[in-house]
Amino acid sequence: MSKNILICLLIFSHLIVLGQHDNLNFDELLSSNSKPENIITGRKLIREYFLNGEIDKVRELKNYLINVAADQEYIAFYPVEYWIILYWTEEYTSLISAIIDVDSLEVERFQNKIKPQYDLLLESLQEKSISAQTKLEASIQSASLSDIKKDFLMLHLKYITANDDHEVITQETLNVFADEFLLNNPESEFEVFIRNYIRFKYVPAKWSFAAELFSGYGMFTNELSGHFGNLVPIGFGIDVSYKNFTLYLRDFIGRGQTKDEISYASGTWEKGSEYDVLLPEASVGYLVFEHKLLKISPFAGISSSEIGPIYFDIVDNPELEKAVLDFTTTYTIGMNLDIKLGQSKVPMFTQKPKQRYWMVRIRYAFNMPQFDDKYDGYNGNLHYLTVGFGRFFRKIKRDI
């Protein structure tokens, strides 16, 4: 019997202590500690009240902690924590003011203050808000607010509860909601916040660059084909693009063999000798089709063609220099087909995001040298097909 009485007394005394704890005002509960300790203890209590559904106490303690930290040294809550609490306490006017007041000066002030130590408050607020999102949205819809403020708060709520593990809300869906809001509410008081913090879209920069190494196969036509056999080129190219226009700068060196004896002023260039074709080119292309795997760009430009003995043969026999068909104006048309390889994905948040990928370029060109203007018996054109391997580079900028 005495044992049972003792147990009852212990239980009763514990209930009395709990009742006293609940009835304590915050000054009595927290005043024995320093300001940082008050904030730490107060945040723990807010988390307990919040998880227990005691939103009135959350509201009171939130106000108390803000007053405690109302100086230039401390903050009681991170912005997202404060916003979520205001959603639960339904203090929408204060919430909207706190959101739209975020600017560069406010961010600088925030960075210079002493911030709360890490605890589980934000995680708890976000987790419970995600599971209760329908309830929070219903509270917004029933509030005495204008439609535009309700729409913004609905968007903002999605924004602050979104994270990498959220099953429904992603950055892509936030962008869709943000674009819809901006379209329906142009130049609203919320536009700056949405564009700076919620909407994250990236668009390609106007300028881009590429480089390639290539080889392939070429053949002459008409009288040129009677003198020079088919050739194998090697070369290097650089692309400089602005929007859909591209300047192609290429250095083409082809090698083949002569098909007959070629007479020159002081001798004969023997049949079967190796020859070189030099074809520096500057052409302009226009992007007519782009897919995640392919790009097609026709081009036209101007080159300069030279055909002659290889360097080492001229060193051995300087007279062969007279057999060279000197550089002559060459008109070039053709088409590039770029196959994208291993295209990089742009991270959502980076300081200077870039788009890079390797590519295989298949290029056909029809070149029209004007040798017959200078040399009799040398009319004709050059067809070539090259396959190049290169790298594309373009910055990606945020679309505000």
Image (cartoon, rainbow, N blue to C red):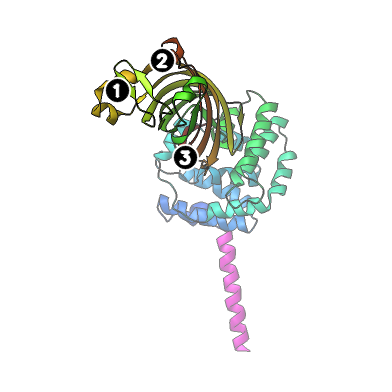
Mark 1, Cα crowd under 10 Å, few <14 / some 14-19 / many 20+, is many
Task: Identify residue type, mark 1.
Answer: Leu
C-alpha separation, residue under disc 1 versus residue under disc 2: 19 Å
User: Could you say whether the residue bearing mark 2 is in a helix, strand or loop?
Assistant: strand
First along the sequence among labels 1 and 2: 1
Of labels 2 and 3, the one closer to you:
2
Give the structural element (helix, strand or loop) at label 1: helix
Q: Which residues are magenta?
A: 1-23
Residue 121 visible in the current orientation = yes
Between the residue at mark 2 and the residue at mark 3, the CA separation in whole angstroms equals 49 Å
Q: Mark 2 = which residue?
A: 328
> Residue 275: where, in percent of width, then height?
37, 28
Q: Horizontal and vertical percent for residue 354?
A: 47, 36
Q: Is residue 199 left or right of residue 140?
A: left
Q: Quadrant of residue 376?
A: top left
Extreme residue in the top direction? 373
**Looking at the figure, which quarter contains the N terminus?**
bottom right
User: Label 2 sits on what residue type?
Assistant: Thr
Q: Which circle, 1 or 2, is nearer the viewer?
A: 1
- Mark earlier in primary sequence (1, 3): 1
Q: Nearer the viewer, residue 148 or 295?
A: 295
Q: Is 184 placed left or right of 216 in the picture?
A: right
Residue at label 1?
Answer: 320
Asked whether 14 falls inside the magenta stretch, the response is yes
Image disc number at residue 350 = 3
Q: CA distance from mark 1 to mark 3?
A: 59 Å
Q: Amino acid at mark 3?
A: Thr
The image quadrant that residue 329 belongs to is top left
Q: Where's residue 41, x and y in %?
A: 48, 56
